[in-house]
Amino acid sequence: MSPKPEAVLYIRIPPVQCKYGETVWLPFLSKTMKFHVIRSRLILFVLFVGLTALFALFVSLSAEEAAPKKILSLQLPQIKKAPPAKEPPVAMTADKERIIKTVRFMSEENFPRSANKVNKEKTINYLVQAFTKAGIQGTRQELTLDDRTETLTNVHALKTGKTDKRIIVAAHYDAVPQSPAADDNASGLAVLIELAYLLKGTNELNCAVELVSYDAEETGYIGSLYHAKKLKSQKVDVACMLCMDLVGYYSEEKDSQDFPLAPLSLIYGTKGDFLGVIGRPQDVRLISKAKKAFQESVPLRVESITVPNFIEGHFSWSDHRNFWAEGYPALFFTDTAFYRNKNYHQKTDTWDTLDYNRLAQVPVGLYHLILAIDAANIQK
């Protein structure tokens, strides 16, 4: 017995007439056609379709071969060449050697520079002469206060402008008795003197620029208190006050920077390699101008913080506080003092601990900030 087919398809086929008149069945057909392996037929159908497709492809390729040949090319987007770069402007620089000379005189040759009356007079004379030599007449302003027995002295240098509106840049010159005070604040004095030299070659600005070195910052911010109140009483239009206090100490070491609020390290990092700019919410546009001016003119890293009025304490330990009190816009520029420089108010605050490459960038950034502030006031 033959094995039963795996699959059987029954199709009714009519009988075929042969030439002998007999009705017969084709040998491979019976009364019903049996497709024992339907899958074989399906495979044949697929092969037929495939061969047809291959034939069509062959005809197509033959026609393409007969056609004129074309070189295949990729049309890449055209890259326009940038125009030749303009020669960068000659970079403005401060005199690093003069900065070092100022810091060394204030912290080494003239130590202690304010506790000793003779040395204090030398300090005042040095500043007056340095401003004058730079091209802006230096003057001394004596302050006689009822509650103090000694006479205090501020040093001023005023570069006049087209208007009476005034930009004030300041740094205190007094120091605690026990410290050479190179960073605090011979560094700020050096910046003021260099700024005077930079301003010397500038055309007349819209605003007047007043460079001031204050007395008695260390004993109560007295020099700046007197100045701010006098400006207010005389109704002087002050565009802003820029305060320099400890601007020369920097470190690339990890964990060299502390903060009054610990979470600030998550924002600014732990390297003391930046100049801090501190202002209040109402000074935010001024802060923005300061950062932009520095970033566009010097490579010195500059970081800023906007201090809400209710936590000013840790951020107002310098002469800018008296201008804030009188309602004037003011910014505080600093290396953050004892939050970075452990020589603060110590005998070790010496001239050779400062970073003069970075310190020399501060007056250049300030100069460009002054130009930006002046331009903004022209537009008003």
Image (cartoon, rainbow, N blue to C red):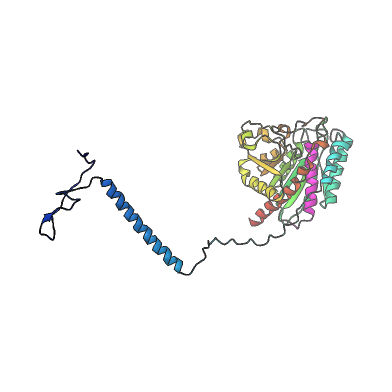
Instruction: Work out whether residue 184 or residue 205 is closer to the camera in this orientation and state it.
Output: 184
> Residue at image x 55%, y 60%?
77
Q: Can you see residue 215?
A: no
- Residue under the image location 21 percent in, 44 percent down: 8
Query: Quick one: quadrant of the N terminus?
Result: top left
- Residue 189 rendering spot, x and y as whole percentages: 80, 42
Q: Write down the quadrant of residue 267 in the picture.
A: top right
Q: In this view, does 116 lie to the left or right of 307?
A: right
Q: Main secondary structure of the magenta part?
A: helix
Q: Which residue lies furthest to the front in this view?
A: 20
3 or 142, nearer to the observer: 3
Residue 195 within the segment the image draws in magenta: yes
The vertical placement of 65 against 119, above or below, is below
Looking at the rendering, which quadrant does residue 344 occupy? top right
Work out which residue is located at the far bottom of the displayed protein and give it: 68
Residue 322 coordinates in the image, percent (x, y)? 70, 39
- For the C terminus, the image quarter is bottom right
| Residue 374 visible to an observer of this rendering | yes
In this picture, residue 132 sits left or right of residue 269: right
**Furthest residue in direction left, as rendered:** 21
Q: Where is residue 109 in the image (x, y as percent from the top left)?
A: 89, 37
Q: Nearer the viewer, residue 320 or 270?
A: 270
Q: Which of 240 and 108 is in front in this view?
A: 108
In the rendered structure, does residue 374 fall within the stretch colored magenta? no
Total numbered labels = 0
Residue 248 in percent (x, y) is at 76, 39
| In the image, residue 215 above or below residue 129 | above
The magenta-colored residue range is 182-204
- The residue at the point 62 percent across, 44 percent down is 284
